[in-house]
Image: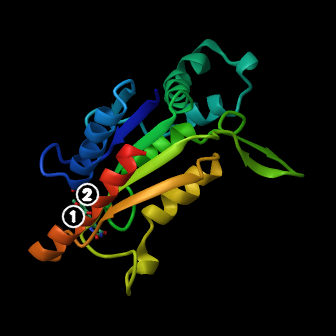
Amino acid sequence: MATVLHISSSVRSTGSTSRQLAAEFLSQRKASHPGDIIIERDLATVPVPHLTEQMMGAFFTPVEQHSPEQAETVQLSDALVAELLGADIIVLGVPMYNFSISSTLKAWIDHVIRVGVTFSYSADAGPVGKVAGKKVYLFIARGGVYSEGPAQSMDFQEAYLRAALGFIGLTDVTAIRAEGLAMGESAVEAALSGSRRLIEQFAAA
Ligand SMILES: Cc1cc2nc3c(=O)[nH]c(=O)nc-3n(C[C@H](O)[C@H](O)[C@H](O)COP(=O)(O)O)c2cc1C
């Protein structure tokens, strides 16, 4: 039995490929792992706020020195971190917007990458991720092709996510990429069938 944290970030409630493929994975996984618990977090419908000066101040103040206001300020971030730490598997639906991830997903990342909480830092050891032993699946959707070819260096979506997640210890990351979605019907068909083959394989694992 695993706890699966499913995070969606496409602004589209219908017609979203990242949502569709993540949903197919979860439904197939549920069939082969009926005991799984799935926690849903939809960042498009319930966005987390951008960081503020007040939040930064609270993040960098030791818990035992928190004012009542700071204790309240860190509650959401603490809840997001607890959700992440409580999951065995993290499923992320990731549309590409302007070569990167959605601003809502970036805001979530800003809440869960916290010094002393999800990573530690020392002069000797440098940064050390504290979120270990979890599996991450990225359901990536994008109009163009970035896994190969001339646009490869413009992928600040998967490359960024791997760097940011890896920084806190999430290094076991598998990407299922539906790309070329704006490149005609046959490209879409090829992207979807390729993704579905991988989904079948990973959902049974
Ligand atoms: C605001 C916006 C920006 C986008 N920027 C890019 C981009 O930089 N590169 C790209 O290949 N596709 C881009 N796209 C296309 C989306 O990545 C594509 O439609 C993808 O399927 C979105 O994910 P979804 O289907 O889960 O909503 C953009 C779409 C939108 C709405």
The x, y position of residue 172, in whole percent, is: 56, 51
Pointer 2: what residue? 196
Task: Tell me how many marks there are.
Answer: 2
Q: Residue at x 44, y 62 (%)?
A: 158
The x, y position of residue 153, in whole percent, is: 46, 79
Which amino acid does the dot numbered 2 rest on? Arg
The x, y position of residue 127, in whole percent, is: 75, 50
For residue 44, which quarter of the picture? top left
Pointer 1: what residue? 193
Which amino acid does the dot numbered 1 rest on? Ser
Secondary structure beneath dot 1 equals helix
The x, y position of residue 71, in whole percent, is: 60, 17
Q: Is mark 1 within 8 Å of ligand 1?
A: no
Q: Nearer the viewer, residue 56 or 202?
A: 202
Q: Residue furthest left?
A: 185
Say if 203 sits above or below 73 in the image: below
Q: Are marks 2 and 1 in contact (CB under 8 Å)?
A: yes
The answer to whether residue 159 is left or right of residue 39 is right
The answer, for residue 36, to whether it is visible in the render is: yes
For residue 194, which quarter of the picture? bottom left
Q: Residue at x 48, y 47 (%)?
A: 136
Say if 45 sits above or below 155 in the image: above
